[in-house]
Image (cartoon, grey):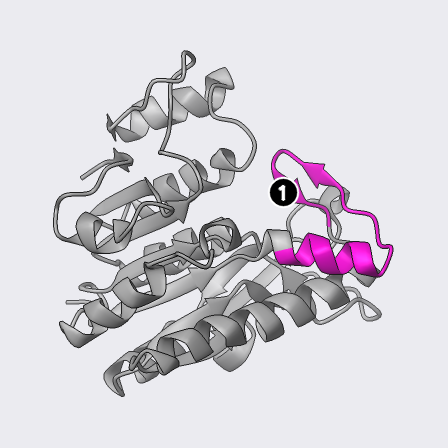
Amino acid sequence: MNKLNKVIVVKIGGSTLGKDDTTIEDIVELQKQGKPLIIVHGGGKVITEWLDKQKIPTRFVRGERVTDEPALDTVTAVLAGLVNKEIVANINSLGGQAVGISGVDGALTQSKVRDKEMGYVGAVVKVNPAPLETLLKSGFIPVVAPISLYSFDRPSQAPRLLNINGDTMAGEISFAIGAEKLIFLTDVAGICNHSGKLLPQLSPEEAEALLASGVASGGMIPKIKACLRALSTTSTTCIIDGRQPHALLKEIGGKGGGTTIGG
C-alpha cells in the first residue's frame, strides 16, 4: 500500500489568503489532529504586482500566464521565495510545523516545456515523492512552490527552471502519491453551469463535458484538468470557496460546499 495514500493535498490560491482568512488556522488544526497534509500554492496576484513594478508585461493564454525569461526570474523569486516563506512563517507562527520547498528541491518534479507559445511554462513528466515522504514522516507539512526542474528536451542555453501552473502541480503530486483527497481553495463558490448555478457534484465525464463546451473557462480550466488527472489514483477531488470561514475544516469534516468531482 502506498505510504502516502492517506495524505490530503490542498492547493491554496493567493487570492484566497486575505487578512481575515482562516486557511492557515485550519491547516494547523488539521496537523494537530494528525492529518497528513501537503500544501501547494500559487501566487498569481503577487507575481503580477512584482512584474508591474519591473515594467514586465503580463500575458495570459487560456487562463495561464505566459512566462518568458525575464518573467521567469520574477516568478521564481516570488513563488519559491516571498509567497512560500510567508505561508510557512504563518503556519509555524500559529504552532504548526511546516517546511517550504519547490519542485526543484530533491528533484521533486522534473518537467519539459509544455508549449512554446507559453514560454518557460512546464509540463510535469516525473514526480519523485521521496522529499514529501521524508518531511511527512518527520512531522512536517511540505509547502510546495510550483517551480520545477527543466529536465527534458532542454537546450543547453535555456534556464534550468520552469514555471508550473499551481493547479497542475497539485494535480500531478496528488496523482503521483495516490492521495486520499485533493482540495482546491478558490475565490469562487465552485463550478457553475452556463446559467451560473453551482454544481455540487460532477462525474469525471460531466467535468470533461464542461471543459469541451467552454462553460468552464479561465482559471477553472487547469483546476478541472488537475482534478481529472488526480482521479485515477485519488479518491476524491473538490473545488471549494476558500473565502468562507473554516472552509477547509468543514470540507474535511464532510460539511463542505463547492463542487466535488468523482468520489
Which residue corresponds to the image point at 48% horizontal and 52% vertical from the top-left?
13
Which residue corresponds to the image point at 40% horizontal and 56% vertical from the top-left?
20
Which residue corresponds to the image point at 38% horizontal and 57% vertical from the top-left?
21
**Where is 9 relative to 62, above or below?**
below
Image coords of residue 105 (percent x, y): 52, 79
Kindly give the residue lying farthest to the top in the view shown: 195
Q: Is residue 139 visible?
A: yes
In front: 11, or 262?
11
Graded by Cα atoms within 10 Å as few (under 14), some (14 to 19) or many (20 or more), the crowding at tag 1 reads some
Kindly give the residue lying farthest to the bottom in the view shown: 138
Residue 252 among magenta residues? no
Image coords of residue 117 (percent x, y): 76, 41
Image coords of residue 16 (percent x, y): 45, 51
Q: Is residue 144 left or right of residue 191?
A: right
Q: Is residue 58 left or right of residue 192?
A: right
Specify start and end residues of the magenta stretch as a single range. 46-66
- The amino acid on which the numbered mark 1 sits, given as a three-letter code, is Glu
In front: 82, or 6?
82
Q: Which residue is mark 1?
A: 64
Residue 138 sits in quarter:
bottom left
Which residue corresponds to the image point at 36% horizontal and 39% vertical from the top-left?
228
In front: 167, or 160?
167
**Where is 245 relative to 34, above or below?**
above
In front: 146, or 246?
246
